Image (tube, coloured by chain):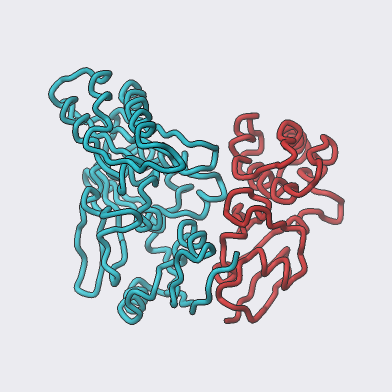
Chain colours: A red, B cyan
Amino acid sequence: MRVEIIVNGRSHDREIEPRLLLVHFLRDLLSLTGTHVGCDTTSCGACTVLLDGVAVKSCTVLAAQADGCEVTTVEGLAGPGGLSPVQEGFRQCHGLQCGYCTPGMVMAATALLAERPDPSEQEIRDGLKGNMCRCTGYQMIVESVQWAAANGGAR
Amino acid sequence: MIPAGFSYVRAGSVEQALAELARHGVDVRLLAGGHSLLPAMKLRRVEPGVLVDIGRLRELAYVRLDGDRVVVGPLTTHRTLERDPLVAEHVPLLAAAARRIGDPQVRNRGTIGGSLAHADPAADLAAAVLALDGVLVARGPSGVRDIPAAEFFTGVRTSALAADELLVEIRLRAATGLGYAFEKFSRRALDWAVVGVAAQARPEGRTAVALIGMGPTPLRAGAVEEALAAGVPAAEASALAARGCAPADNAVASAAYRAHLAEVLVGRALAAL
């Protein structure tokens, strides 16, 4: 089947198998390998992207379901002015160790701040409940999101 | 993990979805949010030949008040249930259960109709729908029929829906201003409930209590409800939570532990009403 998916503002028209997962569409067909596959079972959140602005786990969405939709991946966050506030927050507050969970954390945090520009610590922890950090660096991830909230938010 | 191959049809209308169901029989599955079905397909526990995507039938995503009923479209996401003002005012138990499902990403995609039709014995929304005296409306080739929630779940991941029927509406008895509670215990943050309970207060002590994880289907805790109706204090009634239940005895939890959880969680829920 044919799908057309707008990824980070650019339209991509591809012939795919219906069973192709969105995460594989991004990684294998578009070479956007910033989106990671962690658990592949809807648990870890490493594959989180924005689908029409909403955070989803792209290992549990068919590319066919995203036909005609807009997808934002971690590659789409930084603008001409540099890193997005969430990305910069992770840099400033050492919000990553091995970095495997980071793209998913950054996308989930971006969705959270778009909805709640000034979240409490508990709201940040609830908002990132679907994202696991195998380095267990949660405290600094929360601090990174707090930094981002104070410095431009989801922009 | 890659699902087995299938042909994909995107339904443009309820009528088209029903026609596809009729045409392909048991070889077809409906795809709503996909957060029960796609994981099962990736594990190849489910291998449909045809997948009919009903996810874009926006006419099936709504929450409305109809007299003393709150009617919910099956494509309403858990996220919407969490925040909808009508749900918050008239069936807040449903919002409380939705809020406890999985994580934000899962709640963004998962739908109430998908969850109920999947009929997992540990599904959070099933407990709330049972406790709210839900009626599930199924539409098939010969018209629509009402299925009371108490008769909808027939076995582990098996429902009363026929292969050619589509769940088109969930009708709940409004509980405006009445006490409610949803409690569940999971081993880890994102896990399914080991045991969960939804409790809905009603006038004259007719409190509804529903359990998940206590048998092959979600169920009403009849012994607790009867005791409460007879005026037995909540602390004593909750000790009857596991009566008549046949909970699974497996690696997640022993049957005895589930029974213990049911008593404790029902006790907490009743205390919170």
Residue at the limit of the structure toward the left, as seen here: B230
Which quadrant would residue B3 be assigned to in this image? Answer: bottom right
The residue located at (30%, 28%) in the rendering is B179
User: Residue B20 in the image: x percent, y percent?
Assistant: 36, 78
The residue located at (19%, 62%) in the rendering is B145
User: Residue A25 in the image: x percent, y percent?
Assistant: 67, 69
Q: Which of A60 and A145 is in front in this view?
A: A60
Which quadrant would residue B242 be assigned to in this image? Answer: top left
Q: Nearer the viewer, residue A51 or B177?
A: A51
User: Residue A51 in the image: x percent, y percent?
Assistant: 61, 59
User: Residue B133 in the image: x percent, y percent?
Assistant: 23, 43
A3 relative to A29 in the view: left or right: left
Q: Nearer the viewer, residue A119 or B110?
A: B110
Q: In which quarter of the image is the N terminus of chain B?
A: bottom right
The residue located at (19%, 35%) in the rendering is B222
B161 relative to A17 in the view: left or right: left
Q: Against A60, is A121 above or below?
A: above
Q: Against A136, is B146 above or below?
A: below
B144 relative to B64 in the view: left or right: left
Which quadrant would residue B122 be assigned to in this image? Answer: top left
The residue located at (45%, 52%) in the rendering is B77
Q: Quadrant of the C terminus of chain B?
A: top left
Q: Against B256, is B108 above or below?
A: below
